[in-house]
Amino acid sequence: MESAYNENEELANLWADPGIKQSLIDQIKQKPEYQNAPTDKIKLKLITDQSIINEFWILWLNIDGKKEPYRKLSNHPRLTSKDFNEINNVVIKYREKQFYWAVGFSSVTFGIYSAFFQKKWMFYNFFRKKSRVPGWPTTKKALGCLGVFWGWLLILNYFFEKQIPFDLKEKKFYEKYNIEFDAN
């Protein structure tokens, strides 16, 4: 891969995102220099594009790269648009895998439930018992299905979040942006 600081490549300019920019402006407004400024005109001069970029750099430097290498990489101030899109594609690929695995594990869970636990008194009473409220048993079943699916999503999220940095390491992003990545 070419150097991260190639002048011909367009930067992702993460600080230009409206939400991030407003957050950076709010942080600048909390600084003593801004709060102690005597006039509004001086306060406006303290909020420039360069000061917003500097604040973004400060926030990036405070990210612990050993604990959060993915976050350190994905928020790098010199990240190019091409690399930003490639990192997002890796994350989207893992989110899709996570969804399909959650659907698969949920299906297996329902298969095991149907084969072994459906007729047990506890499950039978909860899911199939007649109710005075029409549709309540069906609602409980739907909520149960949704709960199983969300449970698998949360469990799988842990494993897929751990895998994303390793995939980015294979693509040599950490080397390109000089971020230390410890595989332990």
Image (cartoon, grey):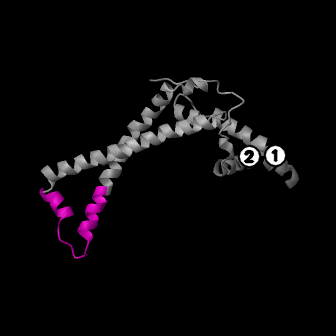
- How packed mark 2 is, by other alpha carbons closer than 10 Å (few <14, some 14-19, many 20 or more), is some
Residue topped by disc 2? 28
Q: Position of residue 142 (x, y in %)?
A: 29, 62
| Residue nearest the observer in this picture, 33 or 82 | 82
- How packed mark 1 is, by other alpha carbons closer than 10 Å (few <14, some 14-19, many 20 or more), is some
Look at 75% across and 45% down and name the residue there: 31
Please name the amino acid that badge 1 sits on. Leu
Look at 74% across and 46% down and name the residue there: 28
Q: Position of residue 91 (x, y in %)?
A: 48, 39
Look at 16% across and 63% down and name the residue there: 125
Kindly tell me whether residue 39 is visible in this rendering: no
* Sooner in the amino-acid sequence: mark 2 or mark 1: 2
Q: What mark, if any, has residue 46 been given in the picture?
A: 1
Kindly tell me whether residue 11 is visible in this rendering: yes
Q: Are marks 2 and 1 in contact (CB under 8 Å)?
A: yes
| Residue nearest the observer in this picture, 10 or 16 | 10
Place residue 32 in its image quadrant: top right
Q: Which residues are magenta?
A: 119-145
Q: Is residue 105 left or right of residue 12?
A: left
Please name the amino acid that badge 2 sits on. Ile
Q: Is residue 167 left or right of residue 112?
A: right
Q: Is residue 128 magenta?
A: yes
Q: Quadrant of the C terminus?
A: top left
Dominant SS type (magenta): helix
Look at 18% across and 65% down and name the residue there: 128
Q: Position of residue 154 (x, y in %)?
A: 38, 46
How far apart are the alpha carbons under marks 2 and 1?
Answer: 8 Å
| Residue nearest the observer in this picture, 41 or 103 | 103
